[in-house]
Image (spheres, helix red, strand yellow):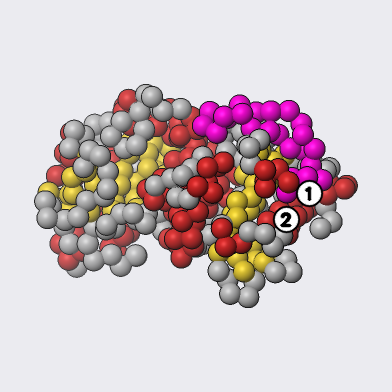
């Protein structure tokens, strides 16, 4: 038997299926991580495929260690993985985070990231029992900041920040009582 | 959530990494002992390495274990099957924390890992990559019956000696 992640949840939205990462996601994530579009999320044009491989391993390892983690979203139309979305809490993070990356520029502007982020926020609140959530965003990452605003997040200047340079902004999500359907 | 297997030897348990192992792992990565394996590292770097070592099980279907004291479950090291992208071949890797040195524990764990690589993972050959200046690790390769088989230029670690393990027919039984 090949050891793998088992019993991980599947989230389904109108256009996306979100599931735990697996090895074959490498071909989709590597071009993103090694591109300029990933410069605010730990990648960049100066990074090599080894860096992308380690990030995918970290995505998978977080599930092993925490029992929850980042989902990869597949397009329900063609099965293509389009990005990573989900609960994220490595040991050096001050709070539970909801993170997102959209891997292809051609998928921008269609509301995919918002659709997926809403699904993983619901999962974090309803299934994982989180009572609050933040998203850590590089202040130069305009697209990500706008998504946070569309998700109802507020800049929280009092919250502790991860030990990163440059410092990341803390965007606080609406509380579960505000977004979980009654 | 995970099917990372557990192996048991006379004195050790080789098991899935847990968050509670992190302090011991980070202590090793921050120490001079990590000099031969890309360190010393900050805690932030160590978090990425620690989570990634668990994640390789998903990416490759095999990986490295935390080597723990069979009685107390205290973490003593990291040993197992390592194959990041860019490696010349799948490797049997070992790093023992300071408290575990000098008792033959790395040897015991590496034999169990090699047995798993050949018996369960189906490897037909195995290497270990060792910094030529790492005399303790080189001595262990010798005790495991490995022989030098060329060098590999690692982007971060520099020139590494490739040690070839005995084939499955010779190396399967501990």
Residue B144's disc number: 1
Instruction: Identify the magenta region.
Output: B140-164
Quarter-wise, where is residue B90 in the image?
A: top right
Q: Is B147 one of the magenta-colored residues?
A: yes
Left or right: residue A100 versus residue B5 is: left
Real-space Cα distance between discs 1 and 2?
A: 7 Å
Marks 1/2 in contact by CB < 8 Å: the verdict is: yes
At label 1, counting other C-alpha atoms closer than 10 Å, the crowd grade (few under 14, some 14-19, many 20 or more) is some
**In terms of depth relative to the viewer, which is nearer, B164 or A51?**
B164
Residue sitting at x 21%, y 42%:
A167
Residue B173 pos. (x, y %): 84, 56
Circle 1 SS class:
loop
* As drawn, B116 above or below B103: above
Q: Chain of mark 1?
A: B
**In terms of depth relative to the viewer, which is nearer, A86 or B63?**
B63
Residue B145 pos. (x, y %): 82, 45
At label 2, counting other C-alpha atoms closer than 10 Å, the crowd grade (few under 14, some 14-19, many 20 or more) is some
**In terms of depth relative to the viewer, which is nearer, A115 or A58?**
A58
Residue B15 pos. (x, y %): 60, 62
Quarter-wise, where is residue A80 in the image?
A: top left
Left or right: residue A102 versus residue B19 is: left
Residue B107's disc number: 2
* As drawn, B83 above or below A179: above
């Amino acid at each position: 038997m090949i050891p793998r992640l088992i019993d991980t949840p599947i989230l389904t939205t109108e256009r996306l299926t979100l599931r735990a990462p697996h090895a074959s996601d490498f071909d989709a994530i590597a071009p993103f991580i090694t591109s300029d579009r990933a410069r605010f999320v730990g990648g960049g044009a100066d990074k090599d495929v080894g860096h992308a491989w380690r990030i995918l391993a970290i995505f998978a390892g977080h599930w092993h260690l925490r029992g929850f983690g980042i989902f990869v979203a597949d397009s329900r139309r063609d099965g293509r993985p389009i990005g990573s979305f989900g609960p994220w809490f490595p040991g050096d993070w001050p709070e539970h985070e909801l993170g997102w990356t959209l891997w292809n520029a051609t998928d921008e502007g269609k509301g995919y990231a918002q659709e997926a982020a809403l699904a993983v926020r619901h999962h974090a609140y309803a299934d994982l029992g989180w009572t609050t959530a933040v998203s850590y965003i590089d202040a130069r990452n305009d697209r990500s900041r706008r998504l946070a605003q569309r998700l109802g997040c507020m800049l929280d200047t009092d919250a502790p920040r991860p030990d990163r340079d440059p410092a990341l902004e803390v965007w606080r999500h609406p509380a579960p009582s505000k977004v979980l359907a009654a | 959530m995970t099917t990372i297997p557990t192996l048991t030897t006379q004195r050790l348990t080789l098991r899935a990494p847990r968050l509670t192992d992190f302090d011991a792992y980070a202590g090793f990565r921050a120490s001079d002992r990590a000099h031969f394996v890309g360190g010393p590292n900050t805690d932030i770097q160590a978090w990425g390495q620690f989570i990634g070592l668990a994640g390789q099980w998903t990416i490759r279907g095999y990986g490295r274990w935390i080597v723990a004291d069979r009685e107390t479950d205290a973490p003593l090291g990291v040993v197992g099957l390592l194959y990041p992208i860019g490696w010349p071949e799948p490797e049997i890797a070992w790093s023992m924390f300071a408290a575990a040195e000098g008792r033959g524990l790395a040897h015991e764990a590496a034999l169990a890992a090699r047995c798993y690589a050949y018996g369960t993972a189906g490897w037909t050959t195995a290497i270990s990559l060792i910094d030529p200046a790492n005399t303790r690790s080189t001595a262990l390769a010798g005790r495991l019956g490995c022989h030098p088989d060329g060098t590999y230029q690692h982007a971060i670690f520099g020139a590494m000696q490739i040690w070839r393990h005995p084939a499955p027919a010779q190396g399967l039984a501990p």
